[in-house]
Amino acid sequence: MRNTIFSGLLLVCGLLGLPAAAQTCGGTYTVKPGDSLSEIADRHYKNASMWTAIHSNNLEVIGERVDTIRVGMTLSLGCIDGHPTGLPGGVPVGSAAAADQAVPALREGSGTAATRSRINLLTAGDFEPFTDRDLPNGGLLADVVNAAMDKADPAAGYAIHWVEDWGSHLEPLLSNALLDLGFPWYRPDCAGTPDSYRCADFLFSDPMFEMLILLFTRKSDPIAFESDADIPGRTLCRPRGYFTHDLDRQGRRWISEERITLRRPQAVADCFEMLMEGEVDAVALNEFTGRTALRDLGLKDSVEIVQARPLSIEGLHVVVHKSHPQAQAMLGTINAGLRGIKEDGTYQAIIDRHMTRVWAGF
């Protein structure tokens, strides 16, 4: 009977020339009794593992612990791969193509020397999904930076330069103002370690993206992580060259006080091999690197993510050296642009577009 009434309404709309309600994607969801993030993800994204996408999109509301969601809380669900549909506040289906057109093409610098009259930004590749020249618009954060700078519209103009040697970015390129701003960079625990190189010498923009750092464990031998007290005595793995400030921040001090054993092999694959051999209790990685490894190594059925809480939440920022004569003004420019694209919806459209591609790969 309900389908008959609905069909009749569509027929009447057609006969009277009235527009039928447009289907929407994304929107807001009000938490109901019995809900969990994984249940909401399963219902609306048809993929329970996308609870992390909901968490990341609602960090200001949910906070660090996923079990703090409560009945009546309003969550924002991004439009990822056409889901979810029918929620209030969604965007009309098909508007993604229009959003693509609204974002300007990436402004890359030309030649080997920076033009000093404009703001010159520095990045590099091999940091999927955030920056890589082979990714759409240079990756998620190249896309965000480009849109933010276009929104800020600095009078002198701007350009993005790719120097495929991350080790040269902070020193000497930015420290000598050979280029002006660099991205994307993690911000260490500057409250706890103000004298560390990055904290002492660089200023950080507002976070462009906040990423979950997760614990990956064997399904056959899961570990609890309800509080920091569950981790001392454990053996964790994180590849050599990856940051460790989240393991040694204020109130944690797992490394400096030797409260954990940290294994640091050369590659991500080595960490997961150690995990499967029982040599470590968990692999500690950002969500994207970890999920990509599970896919590539064929471990999705053998490894799970600890869902109680992330190990940490790390922001990715634009940085400028404190000695740059226009440091504060340039940070003001990028921050104003970020605020602008968040207010007009461009930021969320960029995130949703890139997350659609990322989750299709998982």
Image (tube, helix red, strand yellow):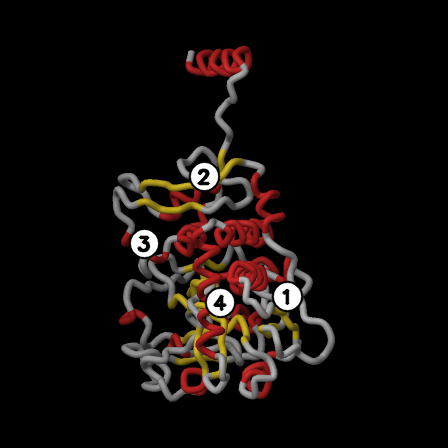
Q: Residues within 10 Å of mark 4 (few under 14, many from 20)?
A: many
Q: Amino acid at mark 3?
A: Val
Q: Residues within 10 Å of mark 1 (few under 14, many from 20)?
A: many
Taking 182 as reference, is 305 above or below it? above
Position of the N terminus by quadrant: top left
Q: Residues within 10 Å of mark 3 (few under 14, many from 20)?
A: some
Q: Secondary structure at mark 1?
A: loop
Q: CA distance from mark 4 to mark 2?
A: 28 Å
Name the residue that disc number 3 marks: 61
List x then y, in percent, for residue 85: 47, 35
Name the residue that disc number 2 marks: 90
Q: Amino acid at mark 2?
A: Gly
Q: Secondary structure at mark 4?
A: helix
Mark 3 and mark 1 in contact? Answer it, CB < 8 Å: no
- Give the numbered dot on residue 334: 4
Which residue is nearer to you in this view: 28 or 297? 28
List x then y, in percent, for residue 250: 30, 79
Q: CA distance from mark 3 to mark 2?
A: 19 Å
Q: Nearer the viewer, mark 4 or mark 2?
A: 4
List x then y, in percent, for residue 260: 36, 79
